[in-house]
Image (cartoon, rainbow, N blue to C red):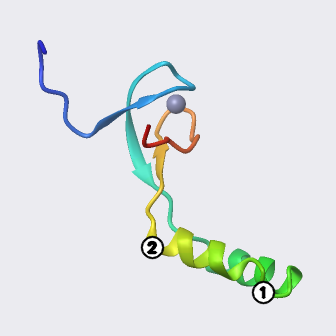
Amino acid sequence: MMTKKQDTYYCSTCKKQVNFHYEPVNHMKMALLSLLTLGLWVPVWMGLTFVKVKYCDECDYPLSDD
Ligand SMILES: [Zn+2]
């Protein structure tokens, strides 16, 4: 490795190392989806609350951990 890159992640959409950010969970939207799906959305809501998803700063797509 030539240089140590900090706080960057490979984005498969941009095809390069990018900075990333975490998107705050929209709890209003999650509550609404839970109501619309009669509670089926609740596990997804919980998952999104506890698992922080990284988003590319450049294209705003979620970055996978692969
Ligand atoms: Zn990207």
Give the residue type that dot 1 points to. Gly
Picture coordinates of residue 13 (x, y %)? 57, 26
x 45%, y 66%: residue: 51
Q: Residues within 10 Å of mark 1 (few under 14, many from 20)?
A: some
x 11%, y 12%: residue: 2
Query: Are the residues flagged by discs 1 and 2 in contact, CB closer than 8 Å?
Result: no
Instruction: Find out if the beta carbon at label 2 lies less than 8 Å from the nearest ligand 1 atom.
Output: no
Give the residue type that dot 2 points to. Phe
Q: CA distance from mark 1 to mark 2?
A: 18 Å
Mark 2: secondary structure: helix
Residue sitting at the far top: 2
Instruction: Find out if the beta carbon at label 1 lies less than 8 Å from the nearest ligand 1 atom.
Output: no
Please, is residue 7 above or below residue 52 in the view?
Answer: above
Q: Residues within 10 Å of mark 2 (few under 14, many from 20)?
A: few
Please, is residue 24 above or below residue 5 in the view?
Answer: below
Q: Nearer the viewer, residue 10 or 26?
A: 10
Residue highlighted by disc 2 = 50
Mark 1: secondary structure: loop
Residue highlighted by disc 1 = 39
Return the disc, 1 or 2, that comes first in the chain's sequence.
Answer: 1
Picture coordinates of residue 46 (x, y %)? 56, 78
x 52%, y 22%: residue: 14
Image quadrant holding the C terminus, namely top left
Label ID, residue 64: none
Picture coordinates of residue 21 (x, y %)? 41, 50
Picture coordinates of residue 56 (x, y %)? 48, 39
x 79%, y 81%: residue: 32
Image quadrant holding the N terminus, namely top left
